[in-house]
Amino acid sequence: MNTKNRQFSRSALINDIMKNARSANIPPGSAEVFANKTADHVEAWIKNRSTVTQDDLDRIIAKKLSTYNRDLAFFYKNNGKII
């Protein structure tokens, strides 16, 4: 089985949240705050782990985003499941 190792990228996460926020019609200023606070949370969470799956990341991102906006969190709760 092939596994793909990738490094966490704060900027990629922020860009992805901002893109999804535009899709959810969230004002850019609010989206930027949500993205930065979520990235801070994810970075702190990752520090204590040697291996993190994409499902783990999506779950943690969705959980944090749900405190700010349920629609935005939905994108991450259902990442890879939406057709």
Image: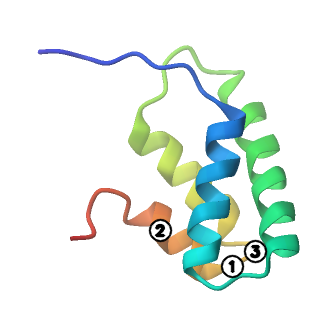
**The residue under label 2 is which amino acid type?**
Phe
Numbered tag placed on residue 54 in the rendering? none
Which residue lies under the disc numbered 2? 75
Residue 63: x %, y % from top left: 61, 61
Residue where numbered disc 1 is placed: 69
Residue underneath mark 3: 68
- Residue 47: which quarter of the image? top right
Looking at the rendering, in which quadrant would you find the N terminus?
A: top left
Check disc 1: other Cα within 10 Å, few if <14, some if 14-19, many if 20+: some
Seen at 60% across and 20% down, the residue is 49
Q: How is the image coloured?
A: rainbow
Q: What type is the residue that disc 1 sits on?
A: Asn
| Gap between marks 2 and 1 measured at Cα | 11 Å
Secondary structure of the residue carrying tag 1 is loop
- Asked whether, in this view, residue 9 is left or right of residue 52, the answer is right
Name the residue furthest left. 1
Image point (48%, 61%), residue name: 76
Circles 2 and 1: CB atoms closer than 8 Å: no
In this rendering, which labeled residue sits more in front, label 3 or label 2? Answer: 2
Q: Earlier in the sequence, mark 3 or mark 2?
A: 3
Of residues 67 and 72, the one drawn nearer to the viewer in this rendering: 72
